[in-house]
Each structure stands twice: as structure tokens, then as C-alpha cells.
Amino acid sequence: MKMQEIIIGKGTENPLVARKPGYGTMRLTGQDFFGEPADRNEAVKLLRRAAELGVNFFDTADFYGPGVTNKLLADAFYPYSPDLIIATKVGSIRGKDKSWQPYSKPEELRRSIDNNLKELRLEQLPLVHLGKSAGSPETYDEALGAVLELQKEGKILHLGLTNITVEQFRFATSKAEIATVENLYSYAQRTTDPNSPFGFQGGEVLELCEQKGIPFIPFFSLQTSLPVEQQKLKQVADAHAITVAQLNIAWLLHKSEWILPIPGTTSIKHLEENIAATLITLSLGEMDFLG
């Protein structure tokens, strides 16, 4: 099937062409996103099936597992095809108690970049997302400066941001060429949620990305936790004889040309359904009904 495409790093010397949707690897880890998957061979098989279906954008991090999804990607695809895009991220680390901890001091970011390169068997990372740094604006400035230095050294091709606020978006885009932004965003979660521990300014940041022509990558994009929204989704999904998850993906693709969904799954059946969602056409009336 013909998949929609989006250009990452448009206007730069080495733009990347990603097909929609991509695939988020975090779910391929063990319980609580920690440790090895229940069946490593099945995980590799799923990744290869995704590529067979046309997926060429894979989202990962050295702290997924930790050290699990990067190695799965290398096992599945190395040596990599020229059009394969691996997007990783830095700024966090997993504790032995499975906690998520900040890891964004300059020397920590360098270690994380080197670790990603080693696990993925790459000499240069195609796309790296810098995570939200704890502390003051000066701390974020220092972290941004550190990854920009690594980019100058050739270890990073394109720089993205993840889990950020509007203020951090504006600051970073004033200092550097930002290729992508990855924030929490879904049909049921589009606006600021002060109770969310993640990048809760999804809709606000999406609008800024649209203004600047920067691809926006939503994570946790299949959330449908709000009853009213769930009811609306099911009504439209039933009319198309598709699943609610498929409608979520179709809604994202219709919502903005700048959105690059990366739904994750551990099921090849669900993977195939996710890719098939690219064929779904929603009318303007259905989009208005969904809101």
C-alpha cells in the first residue's frame, strides 16, 4: 500500500523521508517497560514485519529496557537499509528500581549518545530527541548546548525535542535547527494537563510545529480514557467497521499533515491493523463530530 510521507530536516543538506505511521518500540520491553520481552524472537519478527509493511521510522531509546529495544532493532535490521530511520532520545535513565530518572548533564548526554551508537551499531544517529531537563532554564540551555556539540562532532544528524513545554520549544528553536518534536498527544489528550508527568502541552506544541513546518510525533497516541470521547470514537469506528485503535490513527493522520504517529504494539495482528489505518478516509463531518 502507498503510505503518506513526511520530510524530517526539510531544508537541510540531509533530509530524511519517513513513512506514516512509524513504530514505537517501547512496548517490546518487559513488564513496566523494563527488561527483555517475553519472546525475543517474536519481537524481532514483529519489527521485520513492520518493515515489510512499509514502516521505515522506528522510535527507540537506550533507556528502553534499558538497552533492549536498540539491540532488538540492530538484530532485526543490521546492516540497515538506506531509507531506514532510527530515532532515539536522551535525557533519562532507568534506575534498578525501574524508576525514570533525569540524565541530562553534558557528560551524561555524551555517555547516552555513545551508548546508543554502540547498541545500534551506528557511526551516526539519524535523529536524536533531547528530553525535558529538570531544573532551571539554564540547565536546559546547558543540555541543548551539549547535544549541539555532539551534532557538530558528527554523532547526530538531526536534532529533535521530546517531552517539552511551549517555553522550551521556543527557546530551542531560537538556538538551533529542530527537526522534530515528540510529545504526549492523543484524541483524548490534546490540551494542557497539569497532572501529567509527561510533555502535557501536546496541542499547544503541535500548533507551533505546524507554524514552523516541524513534524510532530505523538506518543501514547492511542489513549482513549475519557468516556465521552470513547463513545464518539466507537460510533465512528463501527460505521467504518474498524477498531477504535485504527480510528485513533486515522484521526491523527487527518488532524494534521505534520503528525507522524508511532503506535506501538507487541501483536503482529495489531501491527497490521495499525498500518491498514492509513487507508481509512474520514469525512469533514466525521472529523467535526469527533471534535
Image: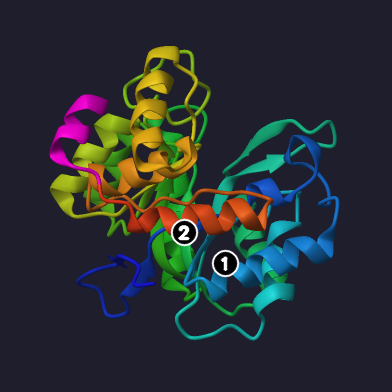
Q: Which mark is residue 50?
A: 1
Up the image or down, 18 lies above or below 202; here it is below
Q: Report the amino acid beneath label 2.
A: Ile
Of 197 and 262, the residue lying toward us: 262
| Residue 124 is covered by the magenta coloring | no
Where in the figure is residue 48, as x and y percent of width and height? 64, 72
Please say which color scheme the image uses: rainbow
Q: Report the amino acid beneath label 1.
A: Ala
Neighbor class of circle 2 (other Cα within 10 Å; few <14, some 14-19, many 20+) is many
Where in the figure is residue 109, as x and y percent of width and height? 58, 53
Residue drawn at 27 percent across, 60 percent down: 177
Where in the figure is residue 129, as x and y percent of width and height? 47, 53
Q: Are marks 1 and 2 in contact (CB under 8 Å)?
A: yes
Of 103 and 260, the residue lying toward us: 260
Residue drawn at 45 percent across, 80 percent down: 83
Of 90 and 278, the residue lying toward us: 278
Q: How many marks?
A: 2
Q: Say what secondary structure mark 2 lies in.
A: helix
Residue drawn at 67 percent across, 34 percent down: 101
Where in the figure is residue 236, as x and y percent of width and height? 33, 32
Quadrant containing the C terminus in the rendered view:
top left
Neighbor class of circle 1 (other Cα within 10 Å; few <14, some 14-19, many 20+) is many
In the displayed structure image, the side of residue 243 where residue 79 appears, left or right: right
Work out whether mark 1 precedes mark 2 in sequence or the reverse, and give the earlier one. 1
Up the image or down, 193 lies above or below 216; here it is above
Q: Specify the principal SS of the magenta part.
A: helix
Q: Which residue is mark 2?
A: 275
Span shown in magenta:
282-290
Q: Which mark is residue 211?
A: none
Q: Say what secondary structure mark 1 lies in.
A: helix
